[in-house]
């Protein structure tokens, strides 16, 4: 691999850029695409392994919460392939688009990054576990897919 890098570097320095600008742009595009794919695969790996990782979709867009990292877009989940793939692989998905009480939703605590639970008193500055958050947001009308809560038999 090192010799290939040397050959490319030698080729680039020996040949004027004018005739090879298209080839250089193609190589740069391929390198960026590779970086993007590797980055996205890392996000999918985190979504599968972190305790409070989840995807949430609302009127403001779609967010993949991965502990201290958040990946987002203004688009709905249907137009965010990375989020769709994470949900297809089992990451919990919270669809808050059906929620109509935006004041109550805005006052919910955030999901803790590390899986901990600061329970009482709840408010905008507090954090709770993902399962506690799902209980709260579901009561407001949110739809849940890949629910991580233990199933209770009746």
Image (cartoon, rainbow, N blue to C red):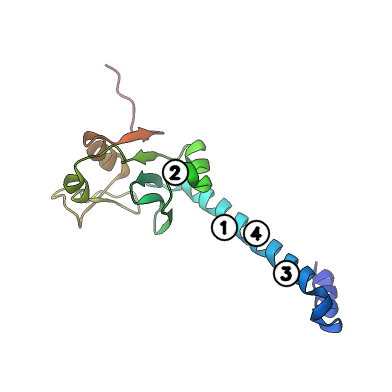
Say which residue label 4 marks: 33
Check whether the beta carbons of the residues at disc 4 and disc 1 lie within 8 A of each other.
no
Q: Residue drawn at (81%, 74%), measured in percent from left and top?
A: 20
In the rendered view, tell whether residue 38 sits above or below residue 21: above
User: What distance separates the C-alpha of mark 2 from that of mark 3?
Assistant: 31 Å
Could you tell me if residue 46 is visible in this image? yes
Q: Residue drawn at (64%, 64%), measured in percent from left and top?
A: 32
- Say whether disc 2 or disc 4 marks the residue closer to the N-terminus: 4
Q: Secondary structure at mark 3?
A: helix
Which mark is nearer the camera, 3 or 4?
Answer: 3
Q: Secondary structure at mark 1?
A: helix
Query: Does residue 82 appear left or right of residue 75 in this picture?
Result: right
- Say whether disc 4 or disc 1 marks the residue closer to the N-terminus: 4
Say which residue label 2 marks: 77
**Label 1: how many Cα within 10 Å (few below 14, some 14–19, many 20+):** few
Say which residue label 1 marks: 39
Could you say where residue 116 lies in the image, as x and y percent from the top left? Answer: 29, 50
In the rendered view, tell whether residue 46 sits above or below residue 140: below
Which mark, residue 25?
3
In the rendered view, tell whether residue 151 sits above or below residue 122: above
**Label 3: how many Cα within 10 Å (few below 14, some 14–19, many 20+):** few
Which mark is nearer the camera, 1 or 2?
Answer: 2
Residue sitting farthest toward the left: 121
Could you say where residue 14 lies in the image, as x and y percent from the top left? Answer: 86, 83
Query: Does residue 59 appear left or right of residue 118 in this picture?
Result: right
């Amino acid at each position: 691999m090192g010799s290939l890098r040397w050959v490319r570097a030698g080729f680039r320095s020996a040949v004027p850029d004018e005739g090879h600008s298209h080839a250089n742009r193609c190589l740069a595009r391929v390198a960026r695409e590779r970086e993007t794919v590797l980055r996205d695969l890392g996000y999918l790996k985190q979504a599968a392994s972190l305790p409070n990782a989840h995807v949430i979709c609302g009127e403001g867009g779609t967010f993949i919460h991965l502990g201290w990292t958040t990946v987002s877009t203004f688009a709905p989940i249907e137009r965010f392939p990375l989020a769709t793939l994470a949900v297809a692989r089992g990451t919990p998905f919270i669809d808050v688009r059906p929620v109509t009480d935006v004041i109550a939703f805005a006052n919910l605590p955030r999901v803790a990054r590390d899986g901990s639970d600061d329970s009482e008193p709840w408010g905008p500055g507090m954090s709770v576990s993902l399962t506690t958050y799902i209980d709260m947001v579901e009561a407001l009308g949110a739809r849940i897919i890949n629910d991580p809560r233990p199933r209770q038999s009746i």
